[in-house]
Image (cartoon, grey):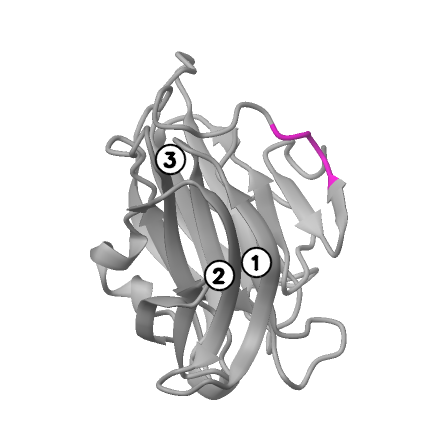
Amino acid sequence: MRASNLFSVLIVALVVGISSGCMKTGSGTNQNTNNVSFISLMHMAPYSSSTEVYFNGDKKTSAIAAGTFSTSYGQIPPGVYDIKFHVAGSDSVLSSLPATTYDSLGFYTLILYNTEGGTGLGSMKINDDFSSLSLSGANYRFFNFCPDAPAVDLYMNTTPVQQGRHVADNASSYYYNSFQAVTAGGYSLQAKKAGTDSVIASVTSVNLVAGAAYTIFLAGSTHSTSNPVTLNVLQAAY
């Protein structure tokens, strides 16, 4: 593990740090009885530099490149924390989150993102609620973090399941951060320009398992070869 031994992150195609622990399913929402909070990180700002994340002024990560995200939750002591995303190796702050409570056995995702067109930076804290996951179906949510795709539709096979999703619209809508049930099984996924058949990115085949929770997200930039536009499927794990 790197930095303060908190986070396992995916960099390009390599997992560094701790390996994924338990997969997050509806049958075991809070199986860990330690007095900890669970945190994941997503650097979804392709027009930004690498970042280091500070909790109450203490650096808790090494440099995190744009396009990098946690593959499993890390742990911190419960408490009140203010969060700052610094330019890596600098005191310059890219974005910050005010001091809020991180509860014992609470699950949270911290996200740095670009606004539409890459003209601005923002950050958000999501409360990840696994208490009402379907056990008979798979569970998913969808985020649009591609600043070059202002509005997208998500298709599962040939069915549009999310329509007109705007860049980082989940920052202001709790509904978009909650998990929706879908029949478990194999799917092809496509993110299309809203209201059209123009495909922005796709996943040819993915198996969504009953009881599991997945975050499907569009990320990257049309102007970047190192962080191109991709559609990603991340299963929650700790």
Gap in angstroms between the C-alphas marked 3 and 1 = 20 Å
Label of residue 107 in the image: 3
Task: Give the residue at x 48% y 72%.
Answer: 191
Q: Residue furthest front?
A: 158
Q: Marks 2/3: CA distance?
A: 18 Å
Mark 2 Cα-neighbour bin, 10 Å: few <14, some 14–19, many ≥20: some
Which label's residue is closer to the chain start, 2 or 1? 2
Amino acid type of the residue tagged 1 in the rendering: Asn
Q: Few, some or many C-alpha atoms within 10 Å of disc 1 (few <14, some 14-19, many ≥20)?
A: some
Residue 58 found in image quarter = top right
Q: Is residue 155 above or below residue 207?
A: below
Mark toward the start of the polypeptide (3 vs 1): 3
User: Looking at this view, is 199 or 142 the one in front?
Assistant: 199
Three-letter amino acid code at the position of disc 2:
Phe
**Nearest the eye: 58 or 147:** 147
**CA distance for labels 2 and 1:** 5 Å
Say which residue appears at 63% left-offset and 45% top-offset: 61
The kind of secondary structure element at disc 3 is: strand
The residue at the point 70 percent across, 60 percent down is 89
> Which residue carries the number 2 mark?
217
Mark 1 highlights which residue?
A: 232
Q: Nearer the viewer, residue 199 or 183?
A: 183
Front tag of 3 and 1: 1
Q: Which residues are magenta?
A: 16-20
Work out whether residue 75 can be spotted. yes
Q: Is residue 171 rendered to the left or right of residue 223?
A: left
Residue appearing at x 37%, y 53% in the figure: 141
- Please state which of the two labelled residues, at mark 2 or mark 3, is closer to the viewer: 2
Image quarter where the N terminus lies is top right
The mark that comes first in sequence, 2 or 3, is 3
Label 2 with label 1: CB-CB less than 8 Å: yes
